[in-house]
Amino acid sequence: MARRPLVLLVPSDRLTGILTSNGLLGYGYDVLVAASVEEALDLLGTNPRISVLVVHVGVENASDGLAFVGAARGDDPDLKVVYTCAMPNRLPEREKVRGAPCLRTPYHPHQLVGVIGQISNRYSPSEHEMQALSHASAM
């Protein structure tokens, strides 16, 4: 049996972290949630199983978030990254890591699942399967 991917989520706020984490768990991912960049760095340093980093980058503090992701990717070149941002077009492309898409907030967990599946070359449920899972989890 294949080990489930471990996603490190660095959300914009606690509620987003809870909702996104629960959604990803419903789609079969293991999830760690960091309340800060510092906590995320600690988790990355102590848990080599983390394969995907999902980080919210606010326009007002974009440099901090982009620098954090650059450092994380520098430590692990195989780390898959997904940025989330309310205004993705305002993030400077030259500061983003290569191969990291940006998902506009707000988003639904099934959208994030699709993006993670695309960048990690792992099984990604079809839209029909994701809708079935969403309906089942809503009951």
Image (tube, rainbow, N blue to C red):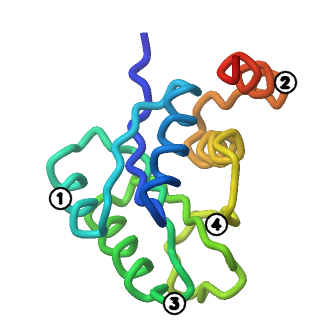
Q: Residue furthest right?
A: 128
Secondary element type, mark 2: helix
Residue 93, above or below 97: below
Q: 21 or 72: nearer the eye?
A: 21
- Residue 42, which numbered label? 1
Q: Are marks 3 and 1 in contact (CB under 8 Å)?
A: no
Residue 43, above or below 50: below
Q: In the image, 123: left or right of 71?
A: right
Distance from the alpha carbon under mark 2 to that under mark 4: 23 Å
Secondary element type, mark 4: strand
Task: Provide the residue designation for mark 3.
Answer: 60
Secondary element type, mark 1: helix
Residue 31, above or below 10: above
Residue 41, above or below 48: below
Q: Quadrant of residue 75?
A: bottom left
Residue type, mark 1 in image: Asp
- Residue 128, which numbered label? 2
Distance from the alpha carbon under mark 4 to that under mark 1: 23 Å
Residue type, mark 2 in image: His
Residue at 34% across, 75% down: 68
State which tag comes first along the sequence, 2 or 3.
Answer: 3
State which tag comes first along the sequence, 4 or 3.
Answer: 3
Secondary element type, mark 3: helix
Task: Provide the residue designation for mark 4.
Answer: 102
